[in-house]
Amino acid sequence: MQANANTIRAVVEEVLSELGRKPKPAQGTARPGGIPVISAGSTTTGGASAYSHSGSGNYGVFDNVNDAAAAATDAFKQLQKKSWGDREKIVQIVKTMCEQNADQWGRAEMEETKIGRVDHKIEKLKIIKLVPGTEFIQPDCYSGDNGLTLEEYAPFGVVGAITPVTHSLPTLAGNIVNFIASGNTCVFNPHPSGARIACAGVQAFNKAFADAIGIENLVTIIGKPTIETANEVFAHKAIRLLLVTGGPAVARAAMQSPKKAIVAGPGNPPVVVDATADLDKAAKSIVAGGSYDNNLLCIGEKEVFAEQRIFDSLMDTMSRHGGYRLNAQQVDALTKLAFSPPKEPGGHPVLNRDLIGRDAAVLAQQIGVSVPAGTQLLYGETDTKNPFVPEEQMMPFIPFVRTKDTMHSIELALEFEHGFGHTALIHSRDVQTMNLMGRLMNTTLFIKNGASMAGLGLGGEGYLSFSIATPTGEGVTTPLTFTRKRRNSLIN
Ligand code: NAD
């Protein structure tokens, strides 16, 4: 018996040393409680690289999906032979480079996409360090009289990823951390309007990766992406798994793919403010969340339902925290500018894409209003027929709807979240109300008494990803999202 126990211990030690880490203290499914803060290292994008690249790609940038998928497959085969420590090196390189180059890369993304706010573009790169890496993957171990069973989280192979224009490089960088931590390689098809910064990031990362662990093309990307190349990614036989981050059309397309697809789809996050809420905190949070990167975030506050009893006080409080209230005529003028009528009966109003992600002052200027310096967000009273309520506007104007009572607010929140299952928020001191809304909404993120970013670890607890899998249910994506469960049993 003693001999058997020693043999098992030796095997466990060997397996774990291969994995490059120690066993977790207790058996079961415990997950790490916190994410360590990563300090900046010495990796930079500058300087000559000893890396000489080969193949048709240019440090991971390819002009067609076939070549990109072949290079990523080759890189995957090499990564399979590398250590756990090598994966960790790659994760740290991405986090460190994002932190060190945040200013330059954030400005470049702003210049290319022309949407959002440069300070938040920079911040979104600095916080890539909050994305979980290899530490998130812990094997589960079962031991007993019959022997030992180890359940490991294994990679799929090559992941095909589609990224949005709203945060091109941050989404790509966060996805890379998750993919490589879990042992996968990838092919990206970025949004055409954010492709330049995405490709620059891939080239910089690949040079550093090759210098660090000697593998080319751990990350590949299509240099001139189109809907056709996106569809080739969906169909390519070398690509085992999809991660799609974007709006309704691409989410629908991915769900129709015969492959396993993890879909981070659109949202239209409602905010309920009830009569028990701390109105000052609520207003401050709505301004901060609704104006973050000029409301480009899928989790950002998009419409507010506040009950009659506190409606006027809440409206007044908003203006003390960087909000600027538009009157009924001004709301009407902005609505006409932001939306044109649906193209077919029963269709959606058509969003004026030129206004997406523009500053509050620019929106105001378009309707002849001059707002004080420091204005973060425009807001005004509307009814639910105003298209700003049902549509995902992605601009810093928030409609406020006056409701009869809390239950009426929750019912409207449910209706206008449209069943996306994405994000909902409440400001309340009533635990029963918060619980009820949480259960009825059943959204992936439910944020109470804070700004939307708190749901991704910015001002709240937990970890970050810019890809929140909503219709397919994986939630805030992590390295585990991109793994297969593999069981190894050793019998006594
Ligand atoms: P988008 O849908 O216009 O584009 C997203 C990506 O999909 C781009 O790469 C685009 O080229 C591609 N694409 C678009 N239509 C396609 C089709 N029919 N077939 C194949 N590919 C297609 O979205 P966007 O403007 O870049 O980003 C904003 C949208 O993304 C919003 O709806 C937002 O809520 C959503 N989003 C969701 C998350 C999340 O984590 N759930 C994160 C960011 C953005």
Image (cartoon, rainbow, N blue to C red):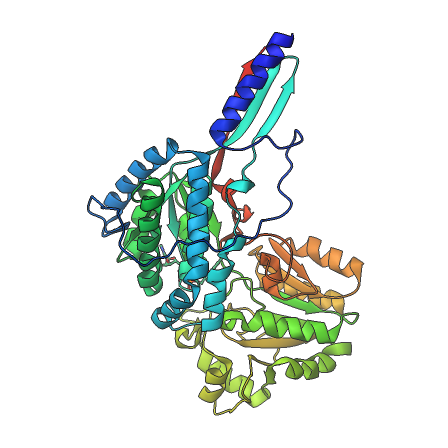
In terms of depth relative to the viewer, which is nearer, 71 or 270?
71
Q: Quadrant of ligand 1?
A: bottom left
Q: Which quadrant: the C terminus? A: top right
Residue at 49%, 56% (x, y): give it.
128
Asked if 44 appears above or below 242 in the picture, the reply is below
Q: For the image shown, how many numbered marks are present on the structure? A: 0
Side of 218 where 98 appears, left or right: right
- Quadrant of residue 355 in the image? bottom left
Residue 245 appears in view: no
Residue at 49%, 84% (x, y): give it.
361
Residue 116 is situated, as x and y percent measured from the top left of the image, at: 45, 72
In terms of depth relative to the viewer, which is nearer, 449 or 249?
449
Side of 155 where 231 appears, left or right: left
Residue 37 is situated, as x and y percent measured from the top left of the image, at: 56, 53
Q: Which quadrant: the N terminus? A: top right
Residue 46 is situated, as x and y percent measured from the top left of the image, at: 32, 59
Asked if 255 appears above or below 292 in the picture, the reply is above
Residue 372 is situated, as x and y percent measured from the top left of the image, at: 55, 89
Residue at 45%, 47% (x, y): give it.
91
